[in-house]
Amino acid sequence: MNRLAAIDAAIQTLVQQKIAKDWYTTAKVANLLGRKEYTVREWCRLKRILAEKRGSGRGPHAAWVVSHAELLRYQRDGLLPIR
């Protein structure tokens, strides 16, 4: 029973913490930053934030995804300069 209580406490701790993902969709990044999804997609396209194209299962067009590290970099330093 003691082990079950420890597991339950660990689960509660994880639920209370904001668990970071490895990759975020443009919709999630937009939501986190208070921007429109179109704006985030344009930043990706123009390389203002570093992102990758990943297959999304929505036809031949892959969707942009942004890494957690890049999201933190953007929050710390802002957009990359226009190239």
Image: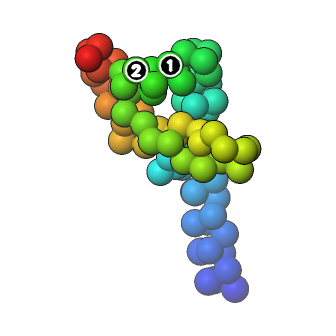
Q: CA distance from mark 2 to mark 1?
A: 6 Å
Residue 52 lies in quadrant: top left
Residue 46: percent from left, percent from top: 40, 20
Instruction: Tell me which amino acid carries mark 2.
Output: Leu
Residue hosting label 2? 46
Q: Residue at x 42, y 37 (%)?
A: 51
- Disc 2 to disc 1: CB gap under 8 Å: yes
Q: Quadrant of the C terminus?
A: top left
User: Which color scheme did the rendering employ for the protein?
Assistant: rainbow
Q: Residue at x 73, y 44 (%)?
A: 58
Q: Residue at x 63, y 30 (%)?
A: 27
Q: Is residue 60 visible?
A: yes
Question: In terms of secondary structure, where does tag 2 sit?
Answer: loop
Horizontal side of residue 57 vs 55, given as left or right: right
Question: In terms of secondary structure, where does tag 1 sit?
Answer: helix
Tag on residue 42?
Answer: 1
Q: Residue at x 53, y 37 (%)?
A: 64
Instruction: Tell me which amino acid carries mark 1.
Output: Glu
**Along the viewing direction, whichever of 3 and 28 lies nearer the viewer:** 28
**Along the viewing direction, whichever of 68 and 39 lies nearer the viewer:** 39
Residue 29: percent from left, percent from top: 55, 30
Q: Is residue 75 visible?
A: no
Tally of numbered tags: 2
